[in-house]
Image: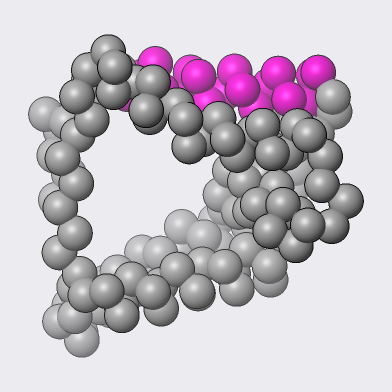
Amino acid sequence: MIDWQSFTPISLVGGLVIGAAASMLLLGIGRIAGVSGITASVVRIKNVEAWQVLFLLGLIVSPLIYQLIAPLPTIEVTSSVPLLIIAGLLVGVGTQLGSGCTSGHGICGLARFSKRSLIAVITFMATGIITVTLFQQVFRLI
């Protein structure tokens, strides 16, 4: 169920900031803001560039800065920790198989009219919908 009351003007601002950051990265240095690829490069400590570290640092620091202005939303985790770990690992495997993540394909790829990204996003969405439906309705795990 979607909590429509949680959507506020700040949600719109967040989307605009993500779009602006992805655009600045592409227009500024010609790189795609694919978070999984950036993270993989930094974690592997292979050919790490300063902008990659700064990009990831920005993802960590920005909520802390936001918290100075307004309280962060309360997060309630209702799934089991092992299920969350398995889900995270599957997302990691999926980003490697799909040559990118939702930010790389969904935000940057679709904005560049990439057919490959369109297929990837359709696959992400369909797989997500099927998985949630199976786990909620069939397996009753979520």
Q: Residue at x 73, y 39 (%)?
A: 52
Image coordinates for residue 120, horizontal then vertical, percent: 63, 57
Q: Residue furthest bottom?
A: 139
The answer to whether residue 106 is left or right of residue 23 is: left
Point 36% across, 64% down: residue:
129
The answer to whether residue 106 of the structure is visible from this angle is: no
Dominant secondary-structure state across the stretch colored magenta: helix
Q: Residue at x 55, y 30 (%)?
A: 58
Q: Can you give x and y, in whole percent of width and height, for residue 116 in the image?
A: 74, 53
**Which image quadrant is residue 54 in?**
top right
Quadrant showing the C terminus? bottom left
Chosen colour scheme: one colour
Asked if one can make out residue 58 in the rendered structure from this viewpoint, the answer is: yes
When the figure is inspected, residue 79 is found, relative to residue 102, above or below; the finding is below
Magenta stretch?
11-28
Q: Position of residue 113 (x, y in %)?
A: 73, 36
Q: Is residue 20 magenta?
A: yes
Q: Is residue 100 left or right of residue 50?
A: left
Q: Is residue 9 magenta?
A: no
- What is the x, y in percent for residue 132? 29, 69
Say how many tags the image has. Answer: 0
Q: Taking 103 as reference, is 90 left or right? A: left
**3 relative to 36, above or below:** above
- Direction from residue 138 to residue 90 in the image, left or right: right
